[in-house]
Image (spheres, rainbow, N blue to C red):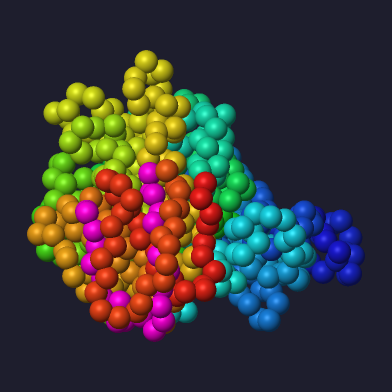
Amino acid sequence: MTDPNPMCGDKAAQPSKWIALLMVVACPLFGARPTWAAAAPNPHAWERWEHALTSSRNYGNPYADVTLRVTYNGPDNRTLRIYGFWDGGNTFRIRCAFPAPGGWRWETECSDVANIGLHRHRGTVEVSPYRGDNPLYAHGFLKVSDNRRYLALADGTPFLWIGDTAWAVPLRASDEEWKTYVADRTAKHFTLIQVAPAPAWAGERDRQGERAFTDKTCSQWNPAYWQSFERKIQHANEKGLAVLLVGLMEPVHRYPEAPQARLFARNIVARLYGNFVIFSPSFDSEVLPLANEVGQAAREATAVHLITQHPGTPWNQPTPTFSDKYYDEPYLDIAAVQTGHNAGHLDWCAHHAIEWTLHLYRHQPHKPIINLEAMYDAQGDKGWRSIDARSLGWRCWLSGAMGYTYGAGDLPPKVPKGSGAIFKWVTDPGKYDHWKKALQWESAFQMQYLHDFLAAIQWWRLEPAHNLIHNQPDDVTRRMVMAKTASGDLAVAYLPDNEAIELDLSAFSAPLTARWFDPIRGRYSPMPGRIENKGTHRFSPPANGDWVLVLQPTGAQTQGDAK
């Protein structure tokens, strides 16, 4: 079935060994026939598959000096065209996550056609259906929904984005610490983590003592570093977590030259092609031409992964100007925003979470909106509290966002208490924000309650409906938000700190029942009686603090039980 012998020629012809030797020498001159690869283990659909190739030639910088590509052809005339990557020594690899069961054929091409170890190799892969319980492998890569409002998995299953910022964790954590982190975040029902490649602010070397690149210009990567990095990404995927890789245009420092940034984008996409990864060139920057160049390079390298931009925060602006400038770029799938920390200005944080999200929601053509970074919880006193991280999530979700990413750590330099918690991976056990302690902060559990609340409803059908609120306060930090379905069979409102919410119920087609949800403790409190769908009705929460109001037609099945 396969012929691992790298000689050229037709196996059936069986030439003598002297003719065969002559053909090996002549093939680079006259054009090598394809070499068939030894059979690799057959994967399931959507699981990562790889094949190693051995270069027959040496290069000064194989990372940059040679380009390897592979074309896959599968059932229903599906075709994938992908890059390979250098992985140390004379080893190159090709990877894929096959989107459908059945037989797939692949063939390589190398920019150096004389390299008989890389050029025109062929193989076949028999892909079987996935039968396990990993939600990623069961449903497939992330995509934009048909109505372009939210993210879904390949089979159309809506993807509920509750993210966590783990920027420096792949660099700073050991493999065992990473497993502990992933286990905790999956137990708390996070669905995605956000990481950076090798940010210099987190250190020069990983826990194995490896640098990401062999030089300061990012001209040649160090395979040992990226093998450890990808191992952590693969483990997260195997435990059901998708990954957003942020900072392709600045893998270490700000900023390499454009050719090196584009080269890294091409290679990291190839390395992670078989993984459930979203790519972002930018990492908390203003809009730069380099970000678009790298976005285009990433799009050229993959047609099946989503691409976004993680912008910086244009402070105290009426609209998210950075997100606006990226919005219409053809490579961009997700309209991401960073509503930000805003140096502790809670009014700016609240305004951005509501108004910036609404602004992007109204933009056409539609793109899913995700808030990739808001104010973190750092156990602060006048900001950076659990309520800040929690309330901004609810405000975004009910203002049109279809995803929210939480963070733990990071107080301003003038506040001596903070040093980074999770995202900087604080390793001093004497610190208040040691990573093990920060994993158990109450705000992380409140993200689980947010996830579980949304998972029990058809959250992807919600549309902002703030206009139905008749008693909005002037103070933006106390401004309430509301979303409802177009048919009126579900409505959700968030009260950050209000005595009551007055709602116009004439927009609903049937009498309603109401329930209160406690976002701090994750518990429901039913309200007795039937509420007529007419006029303005005043709803008062059971106690002080922030609350979530749920309205559904009388007789409708309600989500969740008191916990």
Q: Is residue 18 shown left or right of residue 91?
A: right
Where does the image place residue 123, in percent across and percent down from the top left?
A: 74, 64
> Can residue 497 be seen?
yes
Q: Is 237 drawn above or below residue 183 in the view shown?
A: below
Residue 371 visible to an observer of this rendering:
no
Which residue is at the far top?
A: 430
| Magenta stretch encompasses residue 513 | yes
Give the total of numbered labels. Answer: 0
Front residue of 71/139: it is: 139
* Residue beneath the point at 73% across and 69% down: 101
Q: Is residue 519 left or right of residue 276?
A: left
Whether 39 is among the magenta residues is no
Q: Is residue 135 left or right of residue 207?
A: right
- Identity of the residue drawn at 62% across and 65% down: 139
The answer to which of 233 and 511 lies nearer the viewer is: 511
Q: Residue at x 88, y 70 (%)?
A: 13
Highlighted range, magenta = 498-520
Q: Quadrant of residue 172?
A: top left
- Viewport quadrant of the N terminus: bottom right
Residue drawn at 19 percent across, 64 percent down: 355
Q: Position of residue 2 (x, y in %)?
A: 83, 61
* Horizontal and vertical percent position of residue 96: 61, 60
Residue 40 in the image: above or below residue 323: above
